[in-house]
Amino acid sequence: MSTTLDPVRPVAGGNDVVAPAGHPPATSSSWRALRHSDFRWYFAGTVCSNFGTWLQNTAQMLLAYRLTGSVMAVGLVTCAQFSSVLVLGPWAGMLADRAKDRRLLLIWTQFGSAVVAGGLAAAHMLGWMDQRLLIAGALLIGLSYTFSLPMFNAIVPSLVPEEDTKAAMAMNTVSYNIGRAVAPVIGVGVVMAIGFGWAFLLNAFSFVVLATVLIIIRPGTAQRPAGPSRLWDGFRLARDDRGILLLLVMVCAATVATDPPTVLGPALAQKVFGEADTWAGCFVAALGTGNVLGAFLPTRTISLRRAGWYVGSLGAAMLWFALSPWLWMSIVAGVFGGIAALLTGAATQTLLLERAGPRRVGQVMAVWAIAFAGSRPIASVLDGALAGATSIRLAGAAFAMPALLLGLAAACVPLLPVRAEVVVRRLCTTSKEAIATSNSNAT
């Protein structure tokens, strides 16, 4: 099985990705990645694990809100779950590059997460659960997530042939969101019927299932960095390649835009729409449903500009979610937001991998993990604080604006004068690419 990723060069004068010879047509579906048996096992295992994760996320969200009645408490639990990514993300990327057996490390992280989730289940069933214990459990599971995330992203290309890498990355995002589409609604039912503890226990079981799948599959041999991976290599890579930096900004904006349904969801349902707080599960499920629907859209040629359009569409949908006068319309907006989020995630991950090259996958995906999950704890706390200081709707709208503005900027680039457009394009390339482009123009 081929595992290398040819760095795809932008066309002269732009950043449109041209598919290398032998790749499938640009309009083929992402589901073609499931033709490969190892990836099918991996996909099934991650769907199960993500289903359990979203069961627990929904239970955590509702339990934190019911224990305190505070949006800020929900934000603090979310912050605890993702704060280790922000602090330890560079070390996680370095480990992903240096690890001799990523699969073995992933197996141990899944068993560790199962122990923590099982402990939370026992604590709730025994009547010991309080906000501090809930935050501690979220922090420990987040620690496992921090070290497994870049390794999961680095292992995906070794499960499919090179020409199906983009499809596999898109399906990797889908596996995360199939759980988000279905599990929150089921999670609400589990909580109401048999209690919060069972949601935690089911999550523990899902981690064991994924660990078992990782034992079964046999990934191909991935390329390693030529030299030792240093802690800040990923940040240097982003500093030196403005295109990578812009993609990471898009990832941050997308994460910020999708934060309100989780943090503000219970209060939005109860205090704004006058419904039960359990409707928050439908808000989260709407995003996941949109992600799944987005996977059926044909994949297209990707560029930085198109990625900007996707993230802008996400911002518009989440603005609609926050300001909608009716609950059902907010749910519909969440579905459209989920479609845009999937397209944004697949486009940015694919472009990052292509620009970084196969020997710097761990470095760039570690920085991606910080942008994707590390921006979540900051967003969650600020979201809760802003909602408490102003209003729930205003907080949701404010968090949609960065993504919306990036989309507007991407849409406006073609309207600029030719000279100004060239300047913008050069700002999105590395210095070496800019020099090469200038030389080719001179000749």
Image: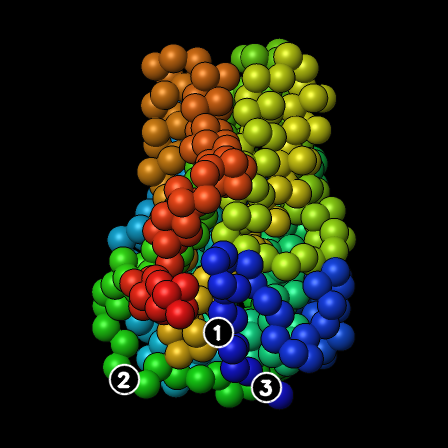
Relative height, residue 45 to residue 395 (above, below): below
Determine the CA span between mark 1 and mark 3.
14 Å
Q: Quadrant of the N terminus?
A: bottom right
Read off the residue under disc 1: 7
Q: Secondary structure at mark 1?
A: loop
Kind of residue at badge 1: Pro
For residue 140, say whether it is visible. Answer: no
Determine the CA span between mark 3 and mark 2.
22 Å
Residue 413 or residue 43, whichever sits in front: 413
Rendered residue at 51%/78% (across/down) = 6
The circle drawn on residue 227 is 2
Q: Quadrant of the C terminus?
A: bottom left
Q: Quadrant of residue 440?
A: bottom left
Relative height, residue 113 to residue 98 (above, below): above
Residue 249 or residue 86, whichever sits in front: 249
The mark nearer the N terminus, 3 or 2, is 3
The image position of residue 420, as x and y in percent, is 39, 42
Q: Secondary structure at mark 2?
A: loop
Report whether 237 appears left or right of 144: left
Rendered residue at 67%/51% (across/down) = 178
The circle drawn on residue 2 is 3
Disc 1 to disc 3: CB gap under 8 Å:
no
The mark nearer the N terminus, 1 or 3, is 3
Determine the CA span between mark 1 and mark 2.
19 Å
Q: Quadrant of residue 35?
A: bottom right
The image position of residue 243, as x and y in percent, is 40, 56
